[in-house]
Image: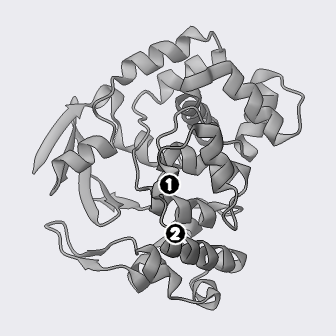
């Protein structure tokens, strides 16, 4: 199955290389993307970005294609922040993904104090070791494991895959989610969702904000990491040093659009766009 979208606001590299997803790889003329137990191939052909997949509805929602990002960019420019206006122009093809919630909880636990190549490698090893093997016209792949499958392994298993001190975090969180599920989290207001996520072992404020933004679609979340701290000082003239206060500064400034603005700013700063 194949569908396309205007590439002005849908550039595969901008979407995938901005730090919001870890299960993707260079493939043919573009990228192969994995989410839960599904995969797709995306590439740009002239003025269109093409998505080839077995589940068009899933990936239409996954890439947030029902949203007009030209309006998001207009809103970004309305803030009158030079760094943000510049970032939006240079990364106009960026879109926020609607990703699987459980997968994002584990992915961002693994991401803490880590670099993207290593995060991708650890997640890939976990999928290969515990995920179901899936068949696809694009080639076989492994689904992201269920929490039950993850819970069946001791921390040492995750350490052997390169997770380091995060081994206990993955194991404990998997056992909790396997026992409780996460259905209760979906309807929570943003602040309460964040508070609840902080009760999972290995989830601190930045990881909680990433999970809210990328795993639960809470677009008012604004994760603060080293790059955002650097940007805050250099481009906003900020003097605060407490990340919670920096987070409050940005969420007060950008409100319900905080997550979109964070990604434009973060991606442009980290990529030196």
Residue at image x 82%, y 34%?
245
Q: Which residue is mark 2?
A: 180
Q: Rounded to the nearest whole Å, what is the CA distance between mark 2 and mark 1? A: 9 Å
Mark 1 secondary-structure assignment: helix
Q: Residue 208 in the image: x percent, y percent?
A: 64, 51
Q: Is residue 110 above or below residue 60?
A: below
| Label annotation for residue 204 | none
Mark 2 secondary-structure assignment: helix
Residue at image x 60%, y 74%?
170
Disc 2, disc 1: CB below 8 Å? yes
Which picture quadrant has residue 132? bottom left
Crowding near the residue tagged with mark 1, few <14, some 14–19, many ≥20 C-alpha atoms within 10 Å: few
Residue at image x 54%, y 66%?
106
Q: Residue 142 in the image: x percent, y percent?
A: 32, 75
Task: Answer whether residue 21 is visible to the viewer in this image.
Answer: yes
Which picture quadrant has residue 189? top right
Crowding near the residue tagged with mark 2, few <14, some 14–19, many ≥20 C-alpha atoms within 10 Å: few
Task: Answer whether residue 121 is visible to the viewer in this image.
Answer: no
């Amino acid at each position: 199955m194949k569908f396309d979208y205007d590439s002005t606001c849908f550039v595969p590299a901008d979407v995938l290389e901005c730090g919001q997803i870890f299960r993707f790889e260079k493939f043919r003329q573009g990228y192969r993307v994995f989410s839960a137990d599904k995969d797709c191939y995306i590439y740009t052909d002239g003025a269109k970005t093409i998505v080839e997949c077995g589940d068009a509805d899933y990936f239409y929602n996954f890439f947030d294609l029902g949203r007009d990002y030209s309006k998001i960019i207009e809103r970004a420019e309305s803030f009158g922040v030079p760094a943000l206006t510049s970032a939006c122009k240079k990364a106009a093809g960026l879109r926020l993904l609607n990703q699987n919630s459980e997968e994002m909880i584990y992915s961002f636990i693994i991401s803490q104090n880590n670099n993207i190549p290593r995060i991708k490698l650890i997640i890939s090893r976990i999928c290969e070791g515990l995920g179901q093997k899936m068949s696809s016209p694009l080639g076989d792949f492994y689904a992201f494991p269920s929490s039950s499958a993850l819970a069946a392994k001791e921390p040492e298993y995750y350490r052997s895959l390169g997770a380091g001190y995060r081994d206990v975090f993955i194991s404990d969180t998997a056992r909790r989610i396997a026992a409780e599920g996460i259905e209760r989290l979906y309807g929570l207001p943003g602040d309460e969702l964040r508070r609840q996520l902080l009760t999972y072992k290995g989830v601190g404020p930045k990881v909680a904000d990433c999970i809210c933004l990328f795993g639960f679609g809470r677009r008012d979340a604004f994760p603060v990491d080293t790059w955002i701290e650097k940007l805050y000082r250099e481009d906003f003239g900020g003097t605060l040093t407490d990340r919670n206060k920096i987070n409050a500064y940005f969420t007060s400034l950008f409100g319900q659009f905080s997550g979109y603005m964070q990604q434009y700013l973060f991606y442009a700063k980290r990529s030196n766009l």
